[in-house]
Structures are given as structure tokens and as C-alpha cells.
Image: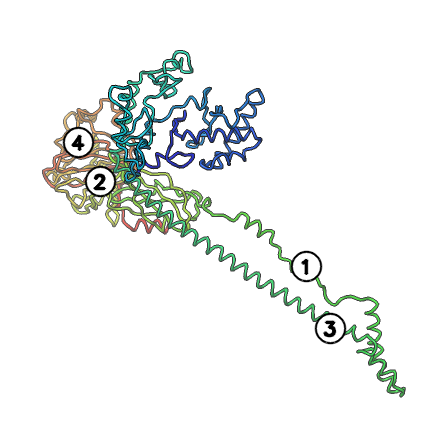
Amino acid sequence: KGIERELICPACKELFTHPLILPCQHNICHKCMKEILFAFEDSFGDGGSESSNQSSPRIKISSSSMDRIDRISRSASQRRSFGWRGRKRNSLTPRSTLFPCPGCQRDIDLGERGMNGLFRNVTLETIVERYRQAARAAVAIMCDFCKPPPQESTKSCLDCSASYCNECFKMHHPWGTAKAQHEYVGPTTNFRPKILMCLKKKVNMYCEICRRPVCHLCKLGGCHANHRVTTMSTAYKTLKEKLSKDIDYLISKESQVKAHITQLDLLLKETECNSERAKEEATQSFEKLFHVLEEKKTAALMAIEASKNLRLEKLQTQTEEYQGLLENNGLVGYAQEVLKETDPSCFVQTAKQLHVRIQKATESLKSFRPAAETTFEDFIVDIAKQEEVLDVLSFHSNGIEIPEINEEQSRMYNKALISWEYPGKTDLADVFVLEYHKLNREEDSVTWKEVEVYGKSKVISDLDDDSSYAFRVRGYKGSICSPWSREVVLRTPPAPVFSFLFDDKCGYNSEHLLMNPRRTSVESRAGFPLLLGSERMQVGCYITLDYIIGDTGIAKGKHFWAFRVEAYSYLVKVGVVSSNKMQKLFHNTHDTTSPRYDQDSGHDSGSEDAFFDSSQPFTLVTLGMKKFFIPTTPAAPKDPASRILPLPSCLGICLDCDKGRVGFYDAGRMKCLYECEVDCSGMMYPAFALMGGAAVHLEEAVTEKYEEYNDDI
């Protein structure tokens, strides 16, 4: 059941029937190909492509395929104008040379012979038949020659293309006749040819250029004359080995495939959830717009209604005034009654005011103006700008910038501190998703671990030692997310981080060294004691190093610590010292490791320091003037220049007490610069020595406060 999709024709979407192999190595049913080609020929023969859709109810031609058929038909029409004529619909075989493959969506050139030059894919045909037989295992194939009622068939003859029961097979294939030599198989309805034929000749070679079987005539004088060919047996063996090897590889990667399927299933569910969330947010956004529009609509309608009532009131009053000018009505009727007054004094008293009113009515009658406008042009809502805004209303996924991981602020020590920012220095995302995974060459599949972050930094713990990790981040605003940032790879220390502080008691010289209150930084300073001491120096230069050690020792295991040396430092020595030899370290009158020390020869050439003396009470390397000096040993390079490296911004020391080795690292890249043996018989302490202007700062462990500090910034 799992291979059914491989047995479906891309044209009719049904199981293959007599499949043909196209030059693009896709397959198509013989009947489907004829119908597509006839539809294509009819499209330009009848002057349009619409009739091609009705060529057969069996074939399902997509709109894209029809577009390609129309395009091919136009080119074919041009060829026809130069004398080429297509065959009629009742022709047995179409003669088109271009075919729109429904599998790869490309136009395939079929060559001079067109459809006749294609081979049947008999292997695929056999697989389809086996699939059909498995699907209808309960349905028996009946004998074609039994009298009613027919018996169930037991054999199918490939030469006769018929199915027989045992009795009918013996009757139609008697012993001693040619039919007795016919090839028969189990009951089937598919009678495939015995061999592939090309130009009515048996194919016996394989063209490596065209990747198809050919006969000797095609090689001698046909289209494959100049092509490189090989024997069919060789091609069979080679292709079968390649196919078997590839299948074995895929089967061996079954766990990886299942992991990908699981990941895809999760992505399908995540897509469903995110789409529902996006729909909800889009609905809420449009409901907000609807709410605003409803409020605006209500206010506008209320304003129009108020204006209408006011205007109707004015017009109604004006109407009543003019109705009063009618005879025996209103003002005129009242005036007519006044004229009936015969007493002069009473008439004059009333008529004077009445006359003024009559004059006003007369003037208004001469210059008639309605008391109110009937149009509401002042209340037309201008929505031109709003229409433009709504016309470009879309999702703002393109507006979310891609965050970038800041490699300068990110660091890897006891934990990983990952910080990121936007290039435009703007905050656009509501939440971030940080993903990381361990780089392992042995694992084919990659499983990312995901962390949701509401700030712009995150501390990641529980990372393996001496391993590389890839980090990436992207922002979310609602259901819209930005693309992933560029991946940044950081490497963890080679061993667990060892925490300590500078010891302010054992051998600490407060006159020459200055330590901060937290005991995480130390600086050498030249004061009056050095000046007074130099006053007594008449011959030679005996300048001592000021030593300081860590307050915690190491007895066993593998440990790593890091520190920073100021760029202005003139001379700094770093390394480890054993408790058994610590007395020699602090009670030496002169610095035995300094090249300026001169005990025997009487000069300061430094020749006695030609080789690194492993019998020293400590193991230190020299730093200074922005350089890292690899100690002189028999195994070290002879060229002095090759022993001088640029001083890293952060240095690390890895001490393995079990193996008796100490390594000096570039802590930024976790790259070992120098490694040597060390005597770990006693308690081992981190050791530092400073001379002249110099400063050393211990690397602080990464804690959650770094995350809060970055968020505050």
C-alpha cells in the first residue's frame, strides 16, 4: 500500500496502464499520452484549445498543462505554415514531436519518431500488475475457454494472452505441438511482451548518452550512431549494483527518515496551530477596524440627523409664514379684519404695527429664499486616504527585521551567554525563539533545542565540555515570525570551569601589587619602594617578579579557567604551581625565570635560559607587549619568530592532574596554543607573576545576572 503513489499516472491519476518511459525518465499511460497529443493537435487544427478539454472523460488535464498545450500548439501552427500537416483525429498515432510532461511540467522533445520511439516500461507494468493482484486477491480470474459456468483459471499463457483452467490448458496446448512450448505464468490479466523491441529488432545495447535501450540498427545508422553504448548485460549489472547500493543506503538511514517524518508531523501540527492563531489575530484586527468604523458611522449619522431636524424646522416655519399670506388665512386674514375697523384712533393704533409686518412679507415674497439648504454636501465623508491605506493593508511579516547574534557580547564559559540585537536598533518583536544544537559529525540528523525568550539575551546551561554548538534566533510578533538569523558557532571549554579568587595572604606583596576588593583583578604598580631599591643598584639589573596565586587548589581531575591580560602589560607570567614547591616560588632572591637573571656568567645575555627547565618549581608561560611567547623546548620551533603569537583577548589554562599535563588556550576560540607536562604530585594552584605596568582580570562565571544586565542595557 505504501508504494501506491509510485504507481499512479500523473495524467489520469489512476494506476498505470501500459506505461511508456519519456525521455525525461517519467512514465505515462500509453492511452493518456495519445489523448494529450490528439488534444494538442485538435487545438490548433480546430483553431482553439477549448475542444481539447473534451477529448476524453478519462484524462484530467490541469490548467497549467493546457497552457503548455496551447503554447506548443502555437509553435506547431507555425511549423504547419511551412508545409507540415498534422494527421486527422482518426489517425492511429499522433505525430507531434513536443510533449508537455505532466510529471516534471516541462516540454519534452520526442524526436523524429515521436511517440513510436518510446519504450514500454515493462518492469513498472509488472509491479502494477502485482499490486493489482494483491488488491484483488479475493477475486478469482476465470477461465476464458470453459463452457458456462466457467472454472477458476490456474494458468495464463503469455503467448496466447489468455487464461486457462487445467483441463482447458491441456486441451489447447497438447504435447508434441508448438503451443506446448508457450510460456505460462499464474493467473493474470496483464500479458506483457517477452522482450523489448526497437524498430522490430530486439534491443541488445544500452545508450549511455540517452539512457535507454537500443538495437544494433540504431547504433549503426540511426540517431545513436555517434553515442557511447555498452552491452545490455553490463548496463544491467552496473545499474542494478547502483540501485541496490542506493536502496541499502536509504534503508540504513531509516531512523533518519523517521526522524524527519516526526519533525514534519510536528511542523504540520505547528502550522495548523499557527494558522489558527493567525486567523484569530487577523479577526481581532479587523474587528477593531469594524469597531472604529461603527463609531465613526454612528457619529456621522447622528450629525446628519441633527442637521436634518434643524433644517426641517426652519423650512416648516417658513412654510407656515407663507401660508399666512393667503387670503382669509393668517396675516392677510388678520389684516382684512383690521380693515373693517371704523374707529380711526383704534385703527391707527393697530394698523401701524400690522403695516410693518405686511411690508416685510411683501419684501420676502419679492426675493424668495428657502430658510435652509436641502443638500448635505458638508456631510460627505472623505475616505480617499483611508481607501489607499486599506488597499495596501497586508500582513507585516516583511516588517520584522532579522535579529543578529552579537558575537562580541556573546560568550562561552561555564555557561553560554547568547546576546542579539536588531541592525536598525529598533525593537519590533514581542518574543524571540533561540535554537541551538551540538555539532556532531557522526549524527546525520540535526535536532534543534528551542528556548522562548522575552528579552534579547539568554543563558544556556547543561552544555557538554569540549564541544561546538550552533546558535540561531528569530523574532515573533503575534503569529508572524522573522527568518532565522545567521548561525553562530561557539565552543565550550575543554574541561569544567574552575572558580577561584586571588589569594591576598600567601605571598601577596601589597607594596607592588594592587588587588580589587572582589579579588578578581590584580595590577602591578611601581612606587617609592622600587625607586629606593634602584638607588642601591650600581651593577646589573636584578628586578624580581611579583607572584600571586589562587586561593583554591586542585588535587585531581581536569579543570579550566580563563582570564584577561591588559594590552598595556609589559611582562606577565601565567601557569600553575605545586604546593610542594611553593616555598621556592616566594623565597627566591631573584627571578630564575627571567632572561635578565645572571648568576654564573657575569653578563645578561640570557644564554643560560636557552632551554625550558622542567625542574623549575612552577610551570609558567610569558606574556607581554601584546604577544604570547611559546617557551623554548627541544620540541619547539628553532625560529624565534615562530614562537611569538599575538596575545588573545582572553586566555585560558586547562590542567589535567590525572595525565600530568597543562595547556594554554585562546579562550575566545577554545584553541590550544601550547601544552606541556607538569608535576602534579602536590596540590596545584593557579599562579601569576607581574612586572612593570601590568594587570590581570579573572574571567567571571556566567550567571543569570548577565541576562538581566544585558536587558537593562
Q: What residue sits right under mark 1 in the picture?
A: 377
Q: What residue sits right under mark 3 in the picture?
A: 317
Q: What element carries label 4?
A: strand
Percent position (x, y) of residue 513? 23, 43
Looking at the picture, does residue 565 appear above or below residue 607?
below
How far apart are the two marked residues, 1 and 3, measured between alpha carbons? 23 Å
Looking at the picture, does residue 263 appear above or below residue 330?
above
Give the farthest residue toward the top: 220
Q: Is residue 278 left or right of residue 551?
A: right
Q: What residue sits right under mark 4 in the picture?
A: 676
Please tell me which of labels 2 and 4 falls first in the chain: 2
User: Which amino acid type corresponds to the residue marked 1 in the rendered image?
Assistant: Glu
Q: Which residue occupies 35% across, 37% down? A: 5
Q: Can residue 260 be seen in this view?
A: yes
User: Which amino acid type corresponds to the residue marked 4 in the rendered image?
Assistant: Cys
Q: What residue sits right under mark 2 in the picture?
A: 465
Please tell me which of labels 2 and 1 falls first in the chain: 1
Q: How crowded is mark 2: few (under 14 residues within 10 Å), some or many (20 or more)?
A: some
Please tell me which of labels 1 and 4 falls first in the chain: 1
Q: Which of 686 and 304 is in front in this view?
A: 304
Percent position (x, y) of residue 641? 27, 25
